[in-house]
Image (spheres, helix red, strand yellow):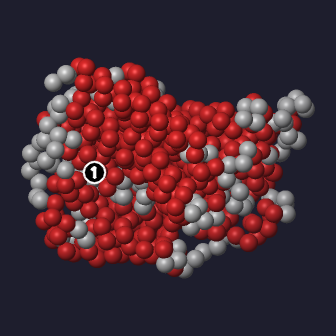
Amino acid sequence: MTELSDREAELVSAHEQERPARQLGGRLRLSVWIVGGLLSVYSLVVVFRPVEALEHRMTFLAVALPLVYLCYRSGWSVPRLFRRGTSASPPPETSAEGVSRAEGTLRSEQPTVADWLLAAASLAVLVYPLLDIDGFRDRGSGAALTDLDIVAGLALTVLLLEAVRRTVGWSLAIICIVFLIYAYYGAYLPIDWTIGHRGFDLGQIVSQLYTGTEGFFGVPMQVAASYIILFTIYGAVLDYSGASKFFIDLSFAAFRKSRAAPGRTVTTAGFLLGTVSGSGVATTVSLGSVAWPVLRRAGYPKEPAGGILAAGGIGAILSPPTLGAAAFIIAEYLRVSYLEVLLYATIPTLLYYLGIFLAIEIDSRRFSTHAVQVDAPKAGRLLLRFGYHFSSLILIIVLMALDRSAFQSVVIATAIAFALSFLDPQHRMGPRRIGQALAKGTLEVLPVTAVCAAAGIIVGVITQTGLGLNLSAIIVDFAAGNLILTTLMSGIAVMLLGLAVPVTASFIIAAVIIGPALTTLGVTQAEAYMFVFYYAVLSEVSPPTALSAVAAAAITGGNTYKTMMMTWRYTLPAFLVPFAFVLTPNGQALLGQGPIGTVLLMTGVSAVAVAALAMATGGLAGWPERVLAAVAAVLLLFLEPVPIVAGLAVLAVAGAVHLVRSRRRDPA
């Protein structure tokens, strides 16, 4: 992510689901950076010197969880220790979260006594099993936990609930508590209830969550301790090496001569910034601070401009090569390479941006926007001078195509990005910048780590009680076994869940509950997980919360609800395309699966459907042709021969009606 001003940081804090970290000062800030940097180094080393899974995840959490308590406020009114102001401020580039700040602009906040005690307790309950990891694992598998094991496991449960409350709020913590209550009291549910079970005592619950890789240290934690930390380190190195500035400059230089250029520029910049930031809100804010003045000068009203900013920002977690944290979890759940997940996302991403570009083209005429002269170097000159920033991105894909693991690929790409930074004297990564980038990599992953560990409670309980299969059966029965109704209900459920919890958590919960409901009706696992992924991400642009849209409205000063609806219009293809690859046999072609001819044909048909959607939602055509275009889009997205032909015919009629009406309005 690019450097954020204090105002921009406030907007991210206000509208991001992850809460802002406190601003540490003095020696404590330096110490936290050092610990964070060392955890990043450990994560890089483990790629080439693997550690046993449970031991690695415990070690990672043993460092990350105490840092959460030191870096994030409790929100409770308690006495504070060491309130020292901003003395001994470290270098100006980095704040407590690793985000750039001007020195002295923010007052430091020191942890309380309670924070220190909780951090110490977190370290103790995670180091304790590491002292005899084999014996600890054996006690868990043999149902022979000691009283100390149970106390430590219960303590870790409480500590994780408090950590997730601090970082992302009450919603996920309450959901976790509900699942724990369900595991313990399930035997008291009526015997004829599908979700009833025999019940589990504290020892059994602790054994499930604490002693193996089914609970706290399951797949979500594995993803946080491997994929996510490595990609955040890579993003931090890209940022410090000047890539963010280059991406924005290149976007403005590439599209500056047409009236649709400002909108296309913002969208392209959002896509490129997605390689550095995995947050839709943060990308929207950092992009908006630069792009809103340009959009305003071009003649865009506040709400459409906010919609473009939010749609471009959400592309940060929809687009290869980095995608969002949930995409890494898909790779682990499906037991496929991350490259394969990137291939799944490629065609939907192209259709997403096609829809935005077409909507921008229509709006440029609708609002009579005009080209804006931007003071930026020519695109060719920028590419010649700084085009090397693309090399590490391309290298990740190439290395994975050559059967290198995603872990090794991103570490090598990080090393290349670091080495190339010396080509730019202004962003040369000396020892200080290296340390800052490593610390930033860890500190930015802390909220995700807390979420993934706490989500392990939900996954562990669902696995232990069989709740996932029971709930999926209820969904299928309620929909009377109808795939269309089941898919519609699933999409709504995932979006509603995403309104309350972060994208990563909503994906994990939905994947283990809704995923089986879809696969029961014949949908492949890849199609089911990608459907859940897109709807989990799209919750960030879905009313009534639409966090990215709210942040964009705060920047432009536009009406929040109207900005949400404009964002929804720009992102509409992303809502409908997932239905295509779930509901139709040829839908798998949109995930790159099947014969190349079929993939190309279905992609072309879907592109026409997206164009029809743009016509239907745009304001240039009249209502008759817009209704016809909407019908055509739906028919085309069935991706079957008869509906395709019918859809093309209806679209042709819509075009003819528009042509006739236009000539009547303007006989000349």
Report if residue 364 is visible in the image. Answer: yes
The answer to whether 84 is drawn above or below residue 243 in the figure is above
Q: Quadrant of the C terminus?
A: top left
Q: How many marks?
A: 1
- The amino acid on which the numbered mark 1 sits, given as a three-letter code, is Ala
Q: Position of residue 193 (x, y in %)?
A: 85, 31
Q: Nearer the viewer, residue 442 or 588?
A: 588
At horizontal 56% and vertical 67% (from top left) the residue drawn is 337
Report the side of 663 relative to 258 (left or right): right
Residue that sits furthest to the right in the current view: 191
The answer to whether 582 is drawn above or below residue 600 in the figure is above
Report if residue 569 is visible in the image. Answer: no
Q: Position of residue 44 (x, y in %)?
A: 46, 72
Q: Quadrant of residue 429?
A: bottom left
Report the side of 112 relative to 415 (left or right): right
The answer to whether 4 is drawn above or below residue 224 in the figure is above
Q: Quadrant of residue 210?
A: bottom right
Query: Would you call the spot at circle 1 few (<14 residues within 10 Å), some (14-19), or many (20 or more)?
Result: many
Which residue is label 1 attached to? 269
At horizontal 67% and vertical 42% (from top left) the residue drawn is 514
Q: Nearer the viewer, residue 77 or 242?
A: 242
At horizontal 68% and vertical 49% (from top left) the residue drawn is 523
Q: Position of residue 447 (x, y in %)?
A: 48, 49
Secondary element at tag 1: helix
Report the side of 587 relative to 28 (left or right): right
Report the side of 189 relative to 21 (left or right): right
Q: Nearer the viewer, residue 548 or 426?
A: 548
At horizontal 31% and vertical 25% (from top left) the residue drawn is 660
Q: Position of residue 605 (x, y in %)?
A: 47, 47
